Image (spheres, rainbow, N blue to C red):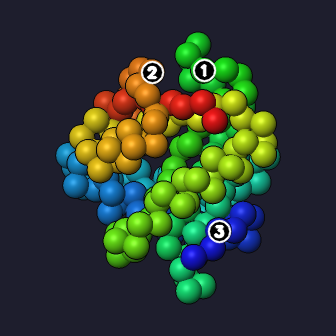
Amino acid sequence: MNFKLATSSNAEVIALLGRITYTESHGHFIDDQKDLLAYCTNAFSIKKTKEELEDKNNLFHIIYVDNLPVGYSKIILNTPFEDKTENSSCRLERIYILNHFLSMKLGQPFLDFIIEKAKEKKASSMWLSVYIKNERGIKFYDRNEFKSIGEFNFLVNGKKYENFVLSKEI
């Protein structure tokens, strides 16, 4: 297993990983599969992914196993959550691993790596949102000492899905 900083040349890989991993992890929660398809088409287009990769406030990393890309993360630097985190906070917007590789327990070393990268960029804390019905995700973040600081409605094709907002000092 190794981790690499993604660049715009990785847009196709990240767009594909995004579509697959989001569908695997959240697809069963979305009420209408047409909404899921519309969300994925918009959120994980190659054009949008390339734009996000070129934004200096975004850090993307890809996790590889045997030289295969099996997951990725996205951190947005200098992004406070409302008035509950500092301006130097970062948002862990995405951390996803393909279902087939979850049994390898890659999530913990990947999160540890991402936190170290955020610290290198002088982030004081990290926050994220997690769907209220995503029990596996909530348990993972609880084990990593993220604490609840609020709620957030995540939109999927205009429909609201309630998320917890969790944060931790780093």
Secondary structure beneath dot 3 equals: strand
User: Residue 127's image quarter?
Assistant: top right
In the image, which disc is placed on residue 149? 2
In the image, which disc is placed on residue 3? 3
Q: Indicate which disc, 2 or 1, sits on the residue closer to the N terminus.
A: 1
Amino acid at pointer 2: Ile
In this rendered view, identify the residue nearer to me: 87 or 119.
119
Q: Indicate which disc, 3 or 2, sits on the residue closer to the N terminus.
A: 3
Query: Residue 168: x percent and y percent?
Result: 54, 31
The N terminus - image quarter: bottom right
Looking at the image, the residue that sits furthest to the bottom is: 66
Query: Residue 40: x percent and y percent?
Result: 43, 56
In this rendered view, identify the residue nearer to me: 152 or 89.
89
Query: Residue 119: x percent and y percent?
Result: 73, 42
In the image, which disc is placed on residue 85? 1
Residue 96 seen in this snapshot: yes
